[in-house]
Amino acid sequence: MAFILSLMLALVVLNLWTFVLFAWDKMQAEQGGWRVSEASLLSLALIGGIGGAYAGRAVFRHKTRKKSFSNALQYIGFFQLVALTFCGVYFYEPGGLSTPVQAEEVQTFAQRPQSHAYYPNCSTARSAGVAPLYRGDPGYRSPLDRDNDGIACEPYRGR
């Protein structure tokens, strides 16, 4: 999860930097100063700053008339969309980041049987939230296991 947050932060910073460079290049173009090369602007868009590039173009009305630059930016955007779709399909796992668990499998610390646990009957074990008890579990005793299958206080299944 920390990797994903770091990646998201890096993309935000990259897009802000791309946006700022579009502003700088527009200002330099109006004042006749040194410009940022188109290759640099397109490279930043290619490595993830496509949002900042499109925002910079829209806000500063910069590089909107040059057809070759516009086409290159559109190709980069299309490439990133295809790559993102591929990654989403390829790395998709049903259940997402977490998988559902059965309610019976979840026990809080207070519900876990203690090493010195003693349950006089199955009703007490059930009310403590520890039933069924398996052979080797704290609190398991053979008198609670009526069918002697290693599972004490199991629910009646009507057999």
Image: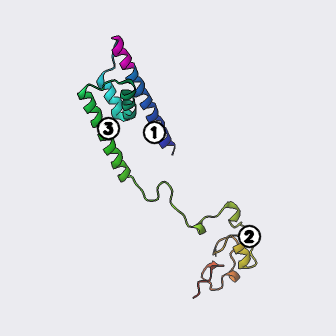
Q: Which contiguous range is marked in magenta?
A: 24-32
Q: Is residue 93 above or below residue 58?
A: below
Q: Is residue 45 above or below residue 140?
A: above
Q: Residues within 10 Å of mark 2 (few under 14, many from 20)?
A: few
Q: Is residue 34 above or below residue 5?
A: above
Secondary structure at badge 1 equals helix
Q: Position of residue 52 (x, y in %)?
A: 40, 31
Secondary structure at badge 2 equals loop
Mark 2 to mark 3: distance in Å? 63 Å
User: Quarter of the image containing the C terminus?
Assistant: bottom right
Task: Judge depth for marks 2 and 1 and give the one in front.
Answer: 1
Colour theme? rainbow
Q: Is residue 71 left or right of residue 109?
A: left
Q: Are marks 1 and 3 in contact (CB under 8 Å)?
A: no
Q: Is residue 117 left or right of residue 14?
A: right
Residue flagged by tag 3: what amino acid is it?
Gly
Q: Earlier in the sequence, mark 1 or mark 3?
A: 1
Mark 2 to mark 1: distance in Å? 48 Å
Question: Predominant secondary structure in magenta?
Answer: helix
> Which residue does the image show at 31% across and 24% down from the upper left?
63
Residue flagged by tag 1: what amino acid is it?
Leu
Q: Position of residue 150 (x, y in %)?
A: 61, 79
Q: Which residue is mark 2?
A: 117
Q: Earlier in the sequence, mark 2 or mark 3?
A: 3
Residue flagged by tag 2: what amino acid is it?
Ala
Q: Which residue is mark 1?
A: 7
Q: Which mark is residue 77?
A: 3
